[in-house]
Image: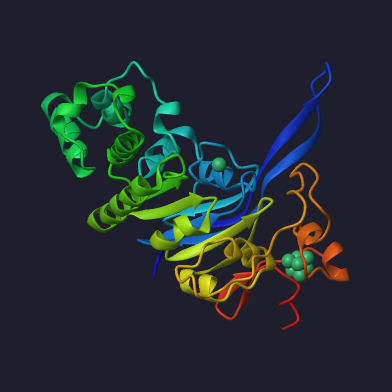
Amino acid sequence: NEPLIEVSNLKKYFPIKKGIFNRTVGHVKAVDGLKFTIFRGETLGLVGESGCGKSTTGRTLLQLLRPTEGEIMYEGRNMVGLPAEELRKMRKDMQMVFQDPYASLDPRMTVGELIAEPLDIHQVVTGQERARRIDELLEIVGLNSRHADRYGHEFSGGQRQRIGIARALALNPKLIVADEPVSALDVSIQSQIINLLQDLQEQFKLTYLFIAHDLSVVKHISNRIGVMYLGGIVELANKQDLFENPMHPYTQALLSAVPSPNPLIKKDRIVLQGDVPSPANPPSGCSFHTRCHACMDICRIDKPELQDVGGRYVACHLYTNA
Ligand code: SF4
Ligand code: MG
């Protein structure tokens, strides 16, 4: 399996400003040193509680946010620090699908205009070809060419997400970052959209980074899953390994909250104590130590690195001396 994107030491810090002189008094370490690979044609799921940095990771990956530090290798080239024009060309290959596409789109534009906007920006088609492409894209996502002249507010949440997906597909991308694409939808609609994304992946050989706060949402669609906590990946594993044998205490807690498909198998729910600490002032050592039931002395002092533990990656001192 060939890597499409290789991320190393990726950081995104947001300055905290205070006072009449707007001085920087600290940083929110939203993403704090990520290392991961996304392989061609796979779906990498990324999960964690809100505020753990998963959306920032997605946006930084596509350079919608400028990384504070780190490397993003795309097809062998580092995207970080590229001149704007070079970046613009590469960005055609990468698109984003949002939780509610209409929150970020112009409500005065018709569906056709919204879908064609990426084509217009990159000036790739004109006239008849443009109209043909709009129809084609609407059909690909299970809508209809009659919808092109209507406005977003006339559609249901699920249809709107189909429009968002059509827009993301307009430039034939290779990578799609889907940031909680079904979180705002009813459960019955969620599976329709996930099935659509899977069909499209097969049809167009797409690679996905699929972001969700809930493990049960990424379970179906992902090949591998990364679990994030306070700006870092704490475990990254094949889906099956992760669900059958979660190793990191945080993954174990998240999984214990996922309802079992077999109600006869009783699981002990691990309830996490306390709140997620602030990413402006993360705990020393292991960032999870304030909530970990297995916390040891070393965990308060020494930050565990993400390391290979029998074919998966785990950042936890329980496994560092193994
Ligand atoms: Fe818990 Fe220590 Fe592992 Fe962190 S390093 S998850 S505190 S056992
Ligand atoms: Mg988010």
With 188 as the anchor, is 314 left or right in this view? right
**At which x and y percent is residue 294?**
78, 71
**At which x and y percent is residue 305?**
71, 66
**Is 246 or 156 nearer to us in this picture?**
156
Rendered-image quadrant of the N terminus: bottom left
With 19 as the anchor, is 115 left or right in this view? left
Count of numbered badges drawn on the protein: 0
Q: Is residue 261 above or below residue 52?
A: below
Report whether residue 304 is seen: no
With 165 as the anchor, is 124 left or right in this view? left
Residue at the extreme front of the image, as rendered? 264
The residue located at (76%, 81%) in the rendering is: 321
The residue located at (64%, 65%) in the rendering is: 269
The residue located at (28%, 30%) in the rendering is: 115
Rendered-image quadrant of the C terminus: bottom right
**At which x and y percent is residue 271?**
70, 60
**At which x and y percent is residue 2?**
40, 67
- Image quadrant, ligand 2: top right
Residue 138, by quadrant, is: top left
Q: Is residue 310 above or below residue 209?
A: below
Query: How is colour applied across the structure in the image?
Result: rainbow
Q: Is residue 296 above or below residue 4?
A: below
Residue 121, by quadrant, is: top left
**Is 52 or 87 nearer to us in this picture?**
52
**Is 60 or 322 nearer to us in this picture?**
322
Report whether residue 307 is seen: yes
The residue located at (84%, 56%) in the rendering is: 284
